[in-house]
Image (spheres, rainbow, N blue to C red):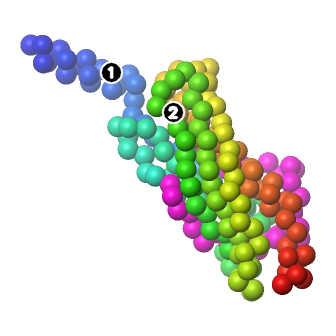
Amino acid sequence: MKKIKLLALLIAVVLLIGCASGAKFENMAYTETSKFKYEQALKKEIGLSGVDGGEKTNPLWTSEISNEAFQEALKLSLTSQGLMSENGRYQLKVNLVKVDQPLFGLDLKVTTHVNYILTDTKTNKVVLDELVVAPFTATFGDAAIAIKRLRLANEGSGKNNIKGFLEKLSLLNVSAISLAN
């Protein structure tokens, strides 16, 4: 009888708390178009060759950022900025180096460490190689359930990281780099 009660309690807890879900790409995408200005040479010239280092979410454990979700968020972000191209002159390779997540807490702070490498396909030269580190804190006010709060923190950190990359891209002078080579 005790085992049945314990099993019922466990099932109730799982149903009340829910399962972990991975970060959603649409919540990580940075689509504000008035913030940054880019060099004309970058317009519709950046292709995304891939994202590595992410993790798939185990529904029974914690929320994670998958390669696929981060790649879709980057595509959406680059497209909204007028930079994305399937066959652009510049190819972007991305590596999620580390995602720092807390195990528990009321305020959950996630920090993403992402390396962005942009290569000029005409010269085979790397024009940008940056590690962007971006934190985001989701509070109890954002979501009472910790699993959802962690997903929100992942998404916020991912979005801040992409924003940081776009900011660095807006400062990039590819014309000067091309002339120097």
Residue at 33%, 26% (x, y): give it.
14
Q: Secondary structure at mark 2?
A: loop
Residue 2 lies, in percent from the top left, at 12, 13
Q: Nearer the viewer, residue 85 or 133?
A: 133
Give neighbour class at mark 1: few <14, some 14-19, many 20+ (Cα, 10 Å): few
In the rendered structure, find residue 128 and report the number of the disc placed on it: none
In the image, is residue 127 above or below residue 21?
A: below
Q: Earlier in the sequence, mark 1 or mark 2?
A: 1
Q: Is residue 171 left or right of residue 75?
A: right
Residue 67 lies, in percent from the top left, at 52, 57
Provide the residue designation for mark 1.
Answer: 13
Residue at 17%, 14% (x, y): give it.
5
| Picture quadrant where residue 119 is located | bottom right
Q: Nearer the viewer, residue 111 or 3?
A: 111
Residue 171 lies, in percent from the top left, at 86, 60
**Which kind of residue does numbered mark 2 sit on?**
Pro
Residue at 47%, 40% (x, y): give it.
63
Q: Secondary structure at mark 1?
A: helix
Give neighbour class at mark 2: few <14, some 14-19, many 20+ (Cα, 10 Å): few
In the rendered structure, find residue 102 and report the number of the disc placed on it: 2
In the image, is residue 149 above or below residue 33?
A: above
Give the quadrant of the N terminus: top left
In the image, is residue 121 above or below residue 73?
A: below
